[in-house]
Image (tube, rainbow, N blue to C red):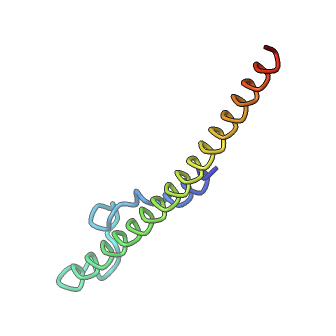
Amino acid sequence: MFAASLISETEGADIPLSSEGGGAGGAVREAGGSFGKMEVAREEEYFRRLQRRQIMRLRKNISKEILLSQKLVREHQDAIARLENRIAELTQIEN
């Protein structure tokens, strides 16, 4: 039920951090120095926050799915109990 939403929310979670990427990253970074380092730090912080939000959403969706599954288990247990009672009633009528 939630599988499609979980996949779409976790896409991009494996985006490499700026220091891990293949490209140079722009003029500021190419120039080096403290501005380049600061830009790398900002970019890495952005991706850490993005990943944190994605994990929080994933946890929330998994929790919802757990609650739904627990509800379905209770409904099935109630149905089993009703059917067992029905069998017991039919057995009494038969005897």
The residue located at (33%, 60%) in the rendering is: 22
**Nearer-the-camera pick, 45 or 66:** 66
Image coords of residue 81 (percent x, y): 66, 35
Question: Compared with residue 37, is residue 63 higher up or lower down, i.e. above or below?
Answer: above
Residue 53 in picture, x, y percent from top left: 43, 69
- What is the x, y in percent for residue 20? 28, 61
Name which residue lies at 49% across and 58% down. Answer: 10
Q: Residue furthest bottom?
A: 35
Q: How many marks?
A: 0
Question: Residue 33: x, y in percent?
Answer: 17, 82
The answer to whether residue 69 is left or right of residue 82 is: left
Residue lying at the far left of the rendered structure: 33
Instruction: Residue 79: name its quadrant.
Output: top right
Q: Residue at x 55, y 54 (%)?
A: 67
Residue in front for this viewpoint, 44 or 2 = 2
Q: As drawn, is 71 to the left or to the right of 57?
A: right
Residue closest to the eye, 80 or 73: 80
Compared to residue 49, the image places residue 85 above or below, namely above
Q: Is residue 85 left or right of residue 65?
A: right
